Image (cartoon, rainbow, N blue to C red):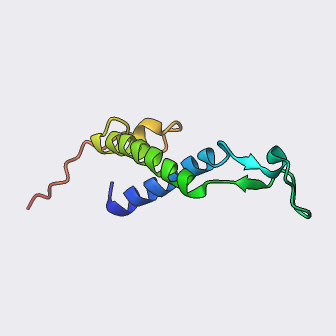
Amino acid sequence: MGIASGIVLFMVIWSLTFMVVLPIRIQTQGDLGDIVPGTHAGSPEHHHLRKKAYIATGIAAVLWGIIASIILSGAISVRDIDMFNRMGPPSTESRETSE
């Protein structure tokens, strides 16, 4: 796994984690009983985005470390998840060139 693919993997994990963390402990205007005219009762009053971004970053870093170590160790490869055998059997030829 290269640097670019590691960064892309982290960003995908972070965005998914952030979407999961986002609705946790949200306080809406309807919950607090202070609805501003012209807004929906489900509009957030206190959303704590910075705290949720830090939480998502911490969880994503742990998940990224686990997933990256699995990928780099070779415990699970692309051939393991090839359900339709589109890749064919692994090649047994060596990559050394003979002169």
| Residue 6 x, y percent position in the rendering | 38, 56
- Which quadrant is the N terminus positioned in? bottom left
| Residue 81 x, y percent position in the rendering | 47, 38
Depth check, front residue: 39 or 85:
39
Total numbered labels placed on residues in the image: 0
Depth check, front residue: 34 or 52:
34
Q: Residue at x 38, y 63 (%)?
A: 4
Q: Is residue 17 left or right of residue 76?
A: right
- Which quadrant is the C terminus positioned in? bottom left
Q: Is residue 32 left or right of residue 53?
A: right
Query: Is residue 1 visible from the viewing direction of this image?
Result: yes
Query: Is residue 88 visible from the viewing direction of this image?
Result: no
Depth check, front residue: 12 or 41:
41
Q: Is residue 30 left or right of residue 59?
A: right
Q: Residue at x 41, y 48 (%)?
A: 61
Give the farthest residue toward the right. 37
36 versus 23 height, above or below: below
| Residue 44 x, y percent position in the rendering | 75, 54
89 versus 54 height, above or below: above
Q: Residue at x 61, y 54 (%)?
A: 48
Give the farthest residue toward the left. 99
| Residue 28 x, y percent position in the rendering | 77, 49
Q: Residue at x 32, y 42 (%)?
A: 69
Q: Is residue 27 left or right of residue 71?
A: right
